Amino acid sequence: MPAIRDARTEGFTIGKLSDLTGVNIETIRYYEKIGMLPAPPRTESGRRIYGPAESHILSFIRRSRGLGFSLNEVRALLRLRAPEKASCREVREIAAHHLEDIRAKLNDLKKLERLLARTVARCSGKVAPDCPVLDILDVGRGRA
């Protein structure tokens, strides 16, 4: 009869986890340090051994961060995704707040775009003393 193996002994290294998830090794260590990723068991030689659960958590974090959620929001979402803690209402609140933030940033970017477009349009492209772009970047310019 073959020996029963612990799934962890057949896990993967931090480098393999990084390759699987697209998350940088230092970022994985950081997520462990701040408690977003549970510290994995280690071999007798001290190497971290990861499994599918850690890979899934890291993929969740990476996707959440890619969508612009803050670390605190991701931490809350991770907590809420557990079956016994699942609350679609709470998840919706977090996502709705994040959506509001994104819309505010988009409005700010639109204002910035209009200002910069007007300024670039006023720029003659000639010698720097009459450069509207430099004027908005250096508010003290031309006052000396």
Image (spheres, grey):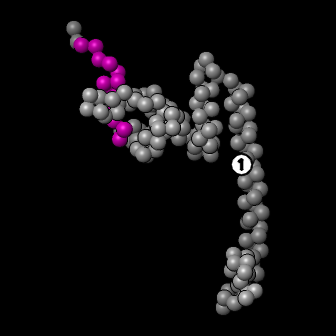
The relative height of residue 138 versus residue 127 in the rendered view (above or below) is above
The residue that label 1 is drawn on is: 102
The relative height of residue 140 versus residue 64 in the rendered view (above or below) is below
Which quadrant, please, contains the C terminus? Answer: bottom right
Magenta range: 3-15
- Density class for disc 1 (Cα within 10 Å; few <14, some 14-19, many ≥20) is some
The percent coordinates of residue 97 (x first, y second) are 74, 40
- Residue closest to the eye, 115 or 80: 80
The residue lying at 45 percent from left, 33 percent from top is: 55
Q: Amino acid at mark 1?
A: Ile
The relative height of residue 10 versus residue 28 in the rendered view (above or below) is above
The residue lying at 34 percent from left, 33 percent from top is: 48
Which quadrant, please, contains the N terminus? Answer: top left
The percent coordinates of residue 118 (x first, y second) are 77, 74
The residue lying at 73 percent from left, 33 percent from top is: 93
The percent coordinates of residue 141 (x first, y second) are 71, 83
State the image quarter where residue 19 is shown: top left
Which type of secondary structure does the marked residue at label 1 adopt? helix
Say whether residue 107 is left or right of residue 7: right
Say whether residue 14 is left or right of residue 73: left
Q: Is residue 21 magenta?
A: no
Q: How many marks?
A: 1
